Amino acid sequence: MTSRKTVLVLGGSSDIGRAAARAFAKAGYDVGLAGRDVAALEPDAADLRARSNVEVGLHKFDVLDTASFDSFVSGLPALPDVVISIVGLLGVQQNAESDLAHATTIMRSNYEGPSLILGLFAEKFLGRGTGTIVGVSSVAGDRGRASNYVYGSAKAGFSAFLSGLRARASRGGVHVVTVKPGFVRTKMTEGMKLIGPLTVEAPVVGDAILRAVESKTDVVYVSGKWRLVMLIIKTLPEAVFKKLKF
Amino acid sequence: MTLVSGWGRFPVVDSDVLRPRSFEAVGEAVARVTGSVARGNGRAYGDAAIGAVRTIGMTGFDRVRSFDPATGRLRLEAGVLLSDLIDTFGPRGFLPFVVPGTRFVSVGGAIAADVHGKNHHCEGGFGRYVDSILLRTGQSETIEASREQNSDAFFATVGGMGLTGVILEATMRLRPVETGWIRERVISASDLDAAMRALEASDSATYSVAWIDCAARGRDLGRSLIYLGEHAGRDELAEGAAAFPAGKDPGLAVPVDLPSMTLNRYSIRAFNELYYRMGARRAGGNHVVSLYPYFFPLDSLSGWNRIYGRRGFLQHQCVIPEAGARAVLGEILDRVARRGDASFLAVLKKLGQGDGILSFPLPGYTLALDFPVKGDILNFLDEIDRLVVAAGGRLYLAKDARQSRATFEAGYPALSRFKAIRKSLDPAGAIRSKLSQRLFDEV
């Protein structure tokens, strides 16, 4: 029996993380799920095993604990073929405007932690000469908006990090995918007003990530409509943009 | 509060919608107010999955707990959709024993409505393949119910429209299949007698259903196409065909509510004429078709409920005991054809005995018709109901949005037994839906 490919999902208990894990398991990958609360990942591991008859491993990972990253990576039983970071925190923009601790947590959860951990994997993958890195960023990073620029700016930083990493790593046989999901109906967006035609369900994102990895796509807007929407938003002159309420 | 409606988009009512993330949170949601009911994927047509006060969305609970590939036994959370089961286990050689006309329903919803498929006449309903249920009752107990343990709760929950509590998990059996293809045979029937004879003669077919042209009148009344189906074996597939067909996401969507003008007696007649003729040309031989178009013809058009316009539509699905079926079905179809606005195709099929206390099926014929909400439709359907009741028939609760208490009580004589079990599980009446308030809760 040939050895199967493996995927490691950072942020495995999120809705998109679960969906991505399912998509890869269905495609025959063995799966590692990493999250803060390993016990809470058990039902998801059982789900993957029941659905796909693949090996599932669980790993403790806290994106804010950057000091632990080195030992996290070296402690893995094997270096995965694909690593996906779905970690992120929307936070509350209004609170972040006056609460520096909250703003810091948003920035660190969406930029510092994901960038550092994927950067570490990139080094290992480049050493091996193969591997795929997937960062789930956000359309919110395409332009800072009044309503969520703390989160958006961190995602912008993450997108820029991934773009630079891709340029460098591609020469060493390592592929980097940036995923910009747009509105997804998940825990994170619960209670938010989402625009129906621009909103997708988590499994759609999971499948899109698998497709992007297998077809070596660089940047994925999960719903094609978002590419157009963000093109328009990005090209609006600042004088106009600052007057828009969104 | 949020405006909520069923798939028929009638009625639209206010309800507090919660999407709990843990079973504990489900329990708290039920305990905190009087008047909750669980909701799966919202494919019940009327008001069955809308809480009197609070609606508990369950689709977040979509984990499979365990699967035994030797027996096809599966333990899973109630929010798993049948489409997910088919996509996940179909390629591994297992399908649900029973599927309704859409695959976008949750397991919990399929149990609560004890949904039937094209095989009810020989294989029974969804509940027959459910071995046990984990139920959160109205008094905040979590109980396991099966045919042996808490059997009253089990048989009240199968077909109980969510009114015994919130279904959290279920153990069910899947059907081993060699392929995901169906060997289909189409029979064209020139009128209602021929259609009923053809269904009768096909009693041993695993799947059978008739699509009736409900615009046809006079001697064409009840003309239809009967679709029979059997699971195809590997050796019946074309060389090189995959054992399991690719399931496509709904491609075509209805993006906006169509103006009610679109559906009129002329467009409906033209559509039905075309459908009948195209189908009749295929009549006779066997064709091997993918399970998706065979079982779920409407799923390829996502949002098809918008065809009926903003005011929504009503589905009228009755079952008539076999003895009196011919006369009553003829009378209903005649009235519908003369009225001219029943839409597209009607569905006629045979049912067997139901399993749950409130399960819809009884041995006889079921007829399903769609009507846009407009004009005097409510009065018209009340008249149809009188024919159904007089023939000893009943209406399907998963489709209903408007039947009267009298119609319901006449059709479901086991209601008092159901109520007694419900009372024992939920003495304070915490679980209530808009449907239960409309049809049988004490006010």
Image: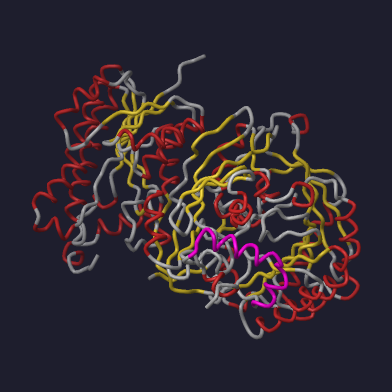
**How far across and down, in percent of the image, does residue B237 sit?**
75, 33
- Residue B344 visible? The answer is no
**How far across and down, in percent of the image, does residue A128 sit?**
30, 17
Asked whether A79 falls inside the magenta stretch, the response is no
Task: Indicate whether A118 appears above or below A225.
Answer: above
Residue B232: name its quadrant. top right
Residue at image location 75% in from the left, 77% down from the top:
B384
Task: Indicate whether B237 appears above or below B425.
Answer: above
Residue B97: name its quadrant. top right
Asked whether B406 falls inside the magenta stretch, the response is yes
A238 and B32: which one is in front? B32
**Left or right position of B362 against A125:** right
Task: Indicate whether B72 appears above or below B304.
Answer: above
Residue at image location 28% in from the left, 44% down from the top:
A137
**Left or right position of B301 against B202:** left
Task: Provide the residue span drawn in magenta.
Answer: B405-427
